[in-house]
Image (cartoon, rainbow, N blue to C red):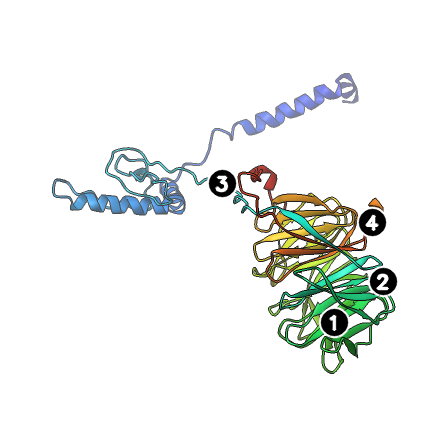
Amino acid sequence: MTEEVQRHSVHTLLFRSLKRTHDMFITSQGTLPAVDELAEKIKKGIKARDSYSLVLEKVKQSKAAKAREPNNDIASDTMSVGDPAEIGSDNAVVPYSGSGALVPTQQNTSVSIIPKKASQMPKPKWHAPWKLYRVISGHLGWVRCATVEPGNEWFATGSADRVIKVWELATGKLKVSLTGHISSVRGLAVSERHPYLFSCGEDRQVKCWDLEYNKVIRHYHGHLSAVYSLTLHPTIDVLITAGRDSTARVWDIRTKANVHTLTGHTNTIASVISQAAEPQVITGSHDCTIRLWDLAAGKSMATLTNHKKSIRAVVFHPTLYMFASASPDNIKQWKCPNGEFIQNLSGHNAIVNCLAVNPEGVLVSGADNGTLHCWDWRTGYNFQRLQAPVQPGSMDSESGIFSMVFDQSGSRLITTEADKTIKIYKEDDTATEESHPIHWRPEILKRRKY
């Protein structure tokens, strides 16, 4: 036996083994079990009802209508839903009308169902391009923040020169300068219900200014490091501030009490916004996350981790229940209240410092390199790109845009920049859809879901 094994190669032995296996099972191939006709009929009937129930219902109606006609000698029997043989019959005529409904006709043709077209991206709304029409000088340092008062008569700016300046919106003239901070002013907000202006800065101070006397009337003590952003709740008398100590603090405006300390971020909070509906507070941080907060409980409702780089700006849409966030990787849009991801706005390849949205659906993003991108909010179409001009005497590297805000009408855009100026943009009144057409291709607007 040993000699026989040695005489044959491995290939020969393997082939013999395969042949024996083949011969063993070839006999069972021809003896397949008998087909159960009743089971097959039931299976086909279930498939027909599942796939063509709407069609079969229309065929029933069509046959019933034929049976009621006076010139019809023989009334057709009502078709059984489970009988698939009737589907391809000449009487089963349910062509597609083109309007989304199946309409029975009297012609003797086969069933014709046109497949539904794939959904296409909506065409972007046309927006007039924006142009620079005023440059305001006066600050002696980087202008870091701006806010517009509810009456739309003036706006305030805060700067690295430690001064808050109030300007007339219509003329651009300086109304008053407020001094009191001992370091760069990073955030401003004007109350809609009180004559108060709130400010925060790198000196860890949060101040409340009485605009009737132009004096500080309250301080809010508690932050352990620089305060970078603040927001006023639109309906409750609370102030929310956030900064480099990775916390957002909720203050009672009147009593100066620290109502909540919102903890959870692991790095600087660069931007905080608030609204009346849930989530009432949203923060964007350098730890690459966005947190949605329950203001009543003082706890985090959700953490959004889609961004891969630090988030420097978040902004609510003024009319839609949505918000946007900006990061060097891209701008993302989200739906409230749970932060469902909507779409990416890619193409602003820079460190985006600020965002602003107006009621017309124009989203503007401003970056460290002085570029402004204008987007159609609904489709994410980038309809304009601007480069902010550097003022004489400034270096090209001082072209960064630090903050931006629309006025109350949404027709003026105020930007604060590293060349120590404030620039005001407005829509170009002379532009038309013919002079500035939409260069729109559906394939470039595919929403990338990540």
Which label's residue is closer to the chain start, 4 or 2? Answer: 2
- Alpha carbon separation for disc pair 3 and 1: 51 Å
Which label's residue is closer to the chain start, 2 or 3? Answer: 3
Residue 193 or 323: which is nearer the viewer? Answer: 193
Residue at x 31% of width, y 40% of height: 94
| Mark 3, secondary structure of its residue | loop
**Residue annotated with mark 3:** 118
**Residue annotated with mark 2:** 161
| Mark 2, secondary structure of its residue | loop
- Alpha carbon separation for disc pair 1 and 4: 27 Å
Which label's residue is closer to the chain start, 3 or 1? Answer: 3
| Mark 1, secondary structure of its residue | strand
Callout 4–callout 3 Cβ contact below 8 Å:
no
Which label's residue is closer to the chain start, 4 or 3? Answer: 3
Q: Pick the quarter of the image with the N terminus.
A: top right
Which mark lies nearer to you, 4 or 3?
Answer: 4
Residue type at tag 3: Ala
Residue type at tag 4: Glu
- Is residue 201 visible in the rendered structure shown here? yes
Q: Is 91 displayed left or right of 235 in the figure?
A: left
Residue at x 62% of width, y 23% of height: 19
Determine crowd level at label 4: few under 14, some 14-19, many 20+ residues with C-alpha closer than 10 A.
some
- Alpha carbon separation for disc pair 4 and 3: 48 Å
